[in-house]
Image: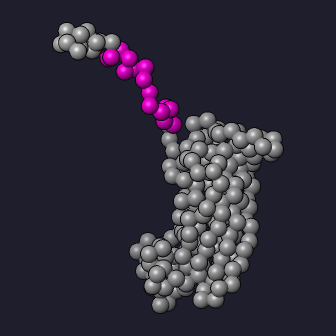
Amino acid sequence: MTKRALLLALPLLASLSGCISFGGKPPKSLLTLTSEATLPVGESQRSNVAATITIAVPSLPQELASSRVPVHSGGTAIAFVKDAQWVERPSQLLQRLLGDTITAKTGRLVLSSRQSLTDPGAYLMGELRRFGIQEETSEAVVTYDAALIRGPESVVEKRRFEARVPVSEIEAAPVGAALNQAANQVAAEVADWVGK
């Protein structure tokens, strides 16, 4: 390409740069989960005094593998809430929420996967089955199938936890608030179960 042709092409390329987009417009804000259970700041925990637990990141179906919020309508149709996106995957948000809630309600020391190599304690794993909106009932639905190994024995306990919270309208802010409330209800029930 000659120098002159390049100079003539520059204005054309500059005008096209405003038309080209490599992804959708980002939402004004991202959604996250906040724990209703408060953790004391500066309090030290020790594994030789407190019972320990390791919480695995829940597995999830493909519809929850993105940062979007699914809306179930009818039997098989799934759409997504406009302008609603999680700051990270719902499974990671729920794992952190479970950890905070279990620590606050039971006093257990929650360990990371690496820390658990030395003192695994109890082990909580599961699948996040639902984490979205049911359009017909206007509810936020969180369903978590949990499996718990309480210690050195290899007995697995399984239990399903579900919370449904009414949502005023299917828009980002009310949907985020309702899902946060439902997730906190599930986390509190799981903490009560773990603490037995």
Q: Is residue 130 magenta?
A: no
| Magenta span of residues | 13-27
x and y percent of residue 120 in the render?
A: 52, 82
Does residue 3 appear anywhere in the picture?
yes
Residue at the far front: name it. Answer: 1
Left or right of 33? Residue 1 is left
Left or right of 69? Residue 137 is right
Dominant secondary structure of the magenta stretch? loop
The residue located at (67%, 73%) in the rendering is 147
x and y percent of residue 47 in the render?
A: 47, 86
Q: Quadrant of residue 188?
A: bottom right
Does residue 195 appear anywhere in the picture?
no
The residue located at (44%, 31%) in the rendering is 22
In the picture shown, does residue 57 fall above or below 48?
above
- Please name whichever residue, 38 or 119, is drawn nearer the observer in this view of the structure: 119
Left or right of 44? Residue 184 is right
The residue located at (66%, 63%) in the rendering is 127
- Please name whichever residue, 149 or 34, is drawn nearer the observer in this view of the structure: 149
Left or right of 101? Residue 87 is left
| Quarter containing the C terminus | bottom right
In the picture shown, does residue 139 fall above or below 26?
below
| Quarter containing the N terminus | top left
Q: Is residue 14 magenta?
A: yes
- Please name whichever residue, 171 or 122, is drawn nearer the observer in this view of the structure: 122
Number of callouts = 0
x and y percent of residue 142 in the render?
A: 69, 57
The residue located at (75%, 40%) in the rendering is 77
x and y percent of residue 183 in the render?
A: 65, 59
- For the rendered model, the colour scheme is one colour
